[in-house]
Image (spheres, rainbow, N blue to C red):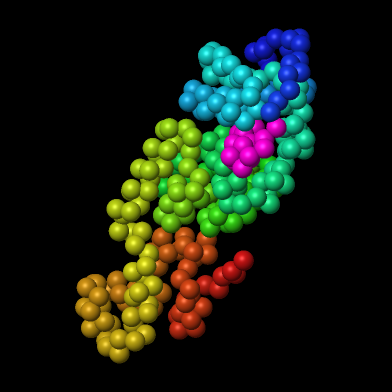
Amino acid sequence: MQGCFPLRRPANFKKIEIPQTYEDNLDEAEIVGIILGDGYIYKNNLVRLKVRELDFCQHFAKLIAKTYGLFAPIKLKKYPTCFVHSTNLAERLINLTRNNKEIPDFILKGDKFIKARFIRGFSDAEGSVDVIYNRRQIVITQNNVSLLKQIKQLLLDIGIQSKVVIKKFGSAKLIISLLRNLELYQEYIGFAISYKRKKLSEAIAYLRNCKAHDSEKYWDVLRHYLHSGKSLRGSAKELGMHWETYRSWIYGMKTPCQIKKNIEYGWVPEDYEDLREQYDFLPLISFQ
């Protein structure tokens, strides 16, 4: 707390509105995501969000008012801070998250829209859009590795593939990359923070316009050579490719970086195993 709030202020025992509708459950899922990310619960009577983005604080305050019927003022100091003095709300969130450490069952067992709203809240709090050099990916940073692994499964339930990276030093990261995954993230989850929404849109536009990410062409080349019956030069000419590039793909001499990344994430065509039987340079992967 570090002197930000008067800790001796009497706790607010005002009765909160318990979520009853499906819409309320969606909003509460997002609130839980925010709390597990950047939120703080103090001695069962204070719920606080302190972040850099004013629009994020305002969004959180609106969710609290809409879902629980509580006023959540915002203090504008070095960082915008939204806080709620409510014993009932603090106790509810502590019980739901098992002392702000775990994802509640209603989210883990919920439909994809409940899961998506939770992920949005958590990503707004702990996520960023990485656009350094040629990278275009969403990175969620967190010390709780088990929590990241649960979020990875929630993403998979929505159809989005991701990878948890654990380093010897520093926080673990969950990475969402590849055009299709980012498009699904934008469609089903998105960000409440405006500049993150903009960066994600720009990242997707970049990947759509980048020929290096036309991964389907690589697989088409492998399929084409199996049935062309022509020489390498003749087969390459049919597809309008330089024959040396065609040859490097067919013999596994060079694999596009994006294809390597696709395979690493398990994002491969349905006939991948059939292609592996013909091209022994394709690695064995486990479909889970």
Q: Residue at left 51%, top 78%? A: 273
Q: Residue at left 53%, top 49%? A: 175
Furthest residue in direction bottom, as rendered: 229
Q: Position of residue 45 (x, y in %)?
A: 75, 20
Q: Position of residue 219 (x, y in %)?
A: 39, 72
Which image quadrant: the N terminus? top right
Q: Nearer the viewer, residue 56 or 252?
A: 56
Q: Residue at left 64%, top 13%? A: 4
Q: Please, is residue 81 above or below residue 279 in the view?
A: above
208 left or right of 121?
left
248 left or right of 154?
left
Q: Position of residue 225 (x, y in %)?
A: 34, 82
Q: Nearer the viewer, residue 199 or 186?
A: 186
* Stretch of the chain drawn in magenta: 18-36
Q: Please, is residue 60 above or below residue 129 in the view?
A: above
Residue 145 in sight in this render = no
